[in-house]
Amino acid sequence: MSVVADAVAIGADASGWLARMRQRAFRHAPSDHTAVVLRHSRIYLLPTRRGWAVIGTLLLMLLASLNYALALGMAVTFLLAGLVAAAQLHTFRNLAGIEITPLAAGETFAGGNLEFALALHAGAAARTGIIVHSANARAGGDIAAGQALTISLAVDAPKRGRVALGRVTLTTMHPFGLWRGWAYVHFLLTGIVFPAAEIGAPPLPRGHGGTDPAALGRSDNADLAGLREFQRGDPPQRVAWKAVARGAGWYSKEFDGAGGGGPVTLAWSDLPPTLPVEERLSRLTAWVLAAERAACPFALQLPGMQLASRQGRDHRREALTALAEYPEDGSA
Amino acid sequence: MNASTWFTLRPQRGTTTVRDLLTPAQIRCLGVLLLAAQLPQAPHLPIWVAATGIMLVGLRIVLLRRDRLRPQAPPARIPSWALAVFAVAAALAVRASFGYLAGRDPSVAFLYILVAIKFLETRSTRDGTLLICLACFLLVTPFFYSQSPLAAIVVLPAVLGVGVALDALTCNRTALPAFDWRSALRRSAVMILQGLPVAALLFVLFPRLAAPLWGLPSDYGAQSGLSDSMSPGQISELSLSDAVAFRVDFDGPVPPPALRYWRGPVFSRFDGRTWSPGPFMLRGGVLPVEGPVVTYTVTLEPNHRRSLFALDLPVALPVFSGGAAPLIGAPYITIDQQLLMRAPMGAESLRYSQQSVLRSRFPAMSSLESRANLGVGEGNPRTLALAAQLRALHPDDSAYIGAILEKFTREDFVYTLAPPLFERDPVDLFLFGERRGFCEHYASAFVLLLRAAGIPARVVTGYQGGAVNPRGGYMIVRQSDAHAWAEAMIGGQWQRYDPTAAVAPSRIELGLGGALSAGEPVPFLARLDATWLTGVQLAWDAFNHDWRRNFIDFNRDRQRSLWRDWRLDQFAPWQVVALIALTIFAWGAMVVGWLMWKRRHQERALVLWDDLNRRLARAGLPRQPHEGPLAFASRAAQRWPQFAIAFAAIGESFAELRYGSVPVARERDALVATLERAIDVLPAPAALRTTH
């Protein structure tokens, strides 16, 4: 019994060690939190295809020189071999010391591009021909010595939810393209992908705070009643930007009778029960955007979570995030 | 300072993208590399091959130029099928020219043309890579034909060109920076220099082959040097040449001139006019003679003959060093004590170490030797009569020989490089007619006189003398040192006699230049009156000899002996590997360290900032590791309020340079200047420390 337990423990230990080594080598899991400075332990070097071709040629030259006992042939071969070796060091040096910092993760709607911002600091050396790429985004170029560069990687985001940047690879083949040097960095950087808004979604549900049923009947929106002095806290959608642009001063638009119907409630349960989950989320997204455009306070009710009726950028983001993170199988 | 440039790259699909196509500048660069690689090879090829290869490369460069001048016109293209046809035609032409195709020389010629054809259709970076590899291989082929210092120098631009072409190809991949000749050349040169230690280590330590993997072509050229027979006038003709026969490095002191008899072909058979080898060319053996052993190494110039030369008397078999040595097979010593190879020498020079005991007298190997060395051939009746007459006076062998030598000394015999032509009965004509002759005449007459008197004798040819090159400390033996002397068997022992010494004793002590009278056509380098030209020639010869001895002939044996000298053979293999790994690692650390230092040094702002930090630390205000430039500058401003403005300028300009984004070079320069001026305002650290 105890023998079996020991064996299991050893097995677990070995696999743990293996996993640790694999993580160290390939950085499959996000493990980098703050800025990473590329050191030799992270940098890999292998010949490129051109490198292999040149090395193969050098071997042929060596063979011919050895067979014919050509000292000069060997000298030229070794001279070029020295060049290849020096190129390897330069490639290493081109990567070593780069500092890469996670800056920010963006947000987008499904089907768009999710942008991640990273900062590259060259350190004391100028860097040439650095290529940064994640799963399906590439960027590249040179960094002058002592300079920091903010780069963005645009990742395809076909589906809603949290999307991690994933493993980022820094590659260089400078100089001579004989060696490919690369290093893996895996930050805990995740962006959020909101559900795509439904195109041609039905209009917003009617508000329940309206005082003028006639107006409600006419339009979902209120009629412009006039302008008043801008007050701190007025939503930007109600600022009379034309007046601001003219230089006439800051005014907010006032609407007659709050005919928009007042705060709306966007409820999961109000949607037709036959609608699939993703389509529901798309419609709710479209409504959230519509409500925000109309500067109309809204409440969001999803199975298992509620957002009180409010309005503004943060509220919108909160609502969209809740929609993005709605569990896929629908079991909240 | 280059500004940063950054692109977001879109992955492209398709076979050949724009990124993979070579720009005209890159193609030009490849063309220049090819020309540089073709140039060292061209002199060793048939003229039409050399010209075709260079012209094809030139054609592409001209077409590129045409494209640039007329950008609207469709780019000039030569269809691939035309090039294929051309390649086949070239192969056929090479075959017709050489007579065969599957050999080293035709292959080299075909490769030379093929590279140029490939260049005509080079468009993508892949083609570029292939071309660079082919050019690399083309760098080795000239050394099949010549390994002179000149050949080494001529190939260097192409080595540099490989780096430049590789650099040019990479410029494409990153789409930047634009290719720039000068920086590419500098980068290539720097990297080759940085790679030199690795190259040297490999050259010294990479194991050489003991035997070639595949056969070397036998290439027979015109024979030169001493021939396999001797007729009157042959050696005197040879002596007109300044060409080097061989060079010798002595392990100990150089023997005196009178003992420098380099034994070569031995002749026993005489037909009345021509001397030829006797029956004793069979394998004999080393004679057990005693005496101090002289050890030396001979570098024999290619002469396409089987003879090797050794000081009289060789006491060991020569030991070859060199790649071609195993093909010749083990040399042997004949019964008449000459060194022979099994096959004639190739086109490469040959090095062998040899041991000799300097003796003029040694026992005969076979009893048959005395009988075979008595033939007098046809003709020369007066000589035979003279022999009979003298023999009657001197029945003792030694006395008889002494009488002959005395005759040469006393009578008016002349030693000359320009003897008359003796057609019939040459010895008679020489002894009783002209009395003017070169060493072969004296040796021939002397041996014939001995044989006529029943004393076994033979002619030995070889070289006598040799001059030590003061610049290199080695001996040069030239064709002008060619000589013939005699050996007589007295009491079962062969004894050397040099009748020429009786006529012209200074020939032995001073060489040809000292023995001939004024007006003789003495070869330039055999003359005694050394001019500055002789000095230059000797210096050049010394350089060449060193080049070959230390570089070209650095073969397996030399390598092993070097390893022994370095005590590498005492280490276990893993220790040697560890040592090499350590050396390579140290080299890498050095180069990387140098790169870091150099790049940091280039960044002026960093240098200034580091310097300021050191100064303030000495003044008692070290920067904390967590402190940024602004925080540190403000702390310094509190400490020394009188310099607050300077510190503020320092902090702001450095922070802006280091962490801001100042893309315009001129603005960066202005900031660096501000930083520098602000730092200049501060007094020395000692003064700062005492200020409050």
Image (spheres, coloured by chain):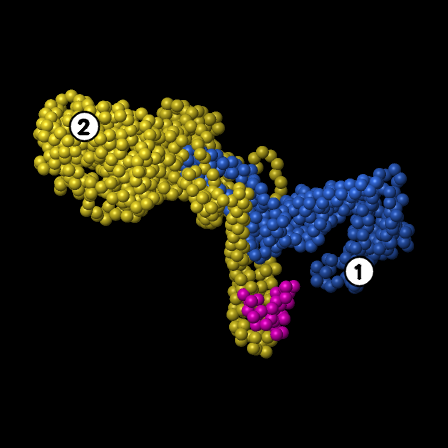
Chain colours: A blue, B yellow
Residue B301 or B217: which is nearer the viewer?
A: B301
Residue B273 or B667: which is nearer the viewer?
A: B273
- Disc 1 marks which amino acid? Asp
Vertical side of B644 occupied by B85: above or below: above
Q: Residue at x 42, y 25 (%)?
A: B102
Residue A226 or A41: which is nearer the viewer?
A: A41
Dot 1 falls on a residue whose secondary structure is: loop
Dot 2 falls on a residue whose secondary structure is: loop
Q: Judge left or right: residue A294 versus residue B113.
A: right
Range of residues picked out in magenta: B611-639
Name the quadrant containing residue A148: bottom right
Give yes or no for residue B468 being in the magenta stretch: no
Name the quadrant containing residue B277: top left
Name the residue tied to disc 1.
A234
Q: Residues within 10 Å of mark 2 (few under 14, many from 20)?
A: many
Give yes or no for residue B612 being in the magenta stretch: yes
Q: Judge left or right: residue A258 versus residue B195.
A: right
How far is mark 1 from mark 2, CA to CA? 138 Å
Q: Residue at x 47, y 34 (%)?
A: A63
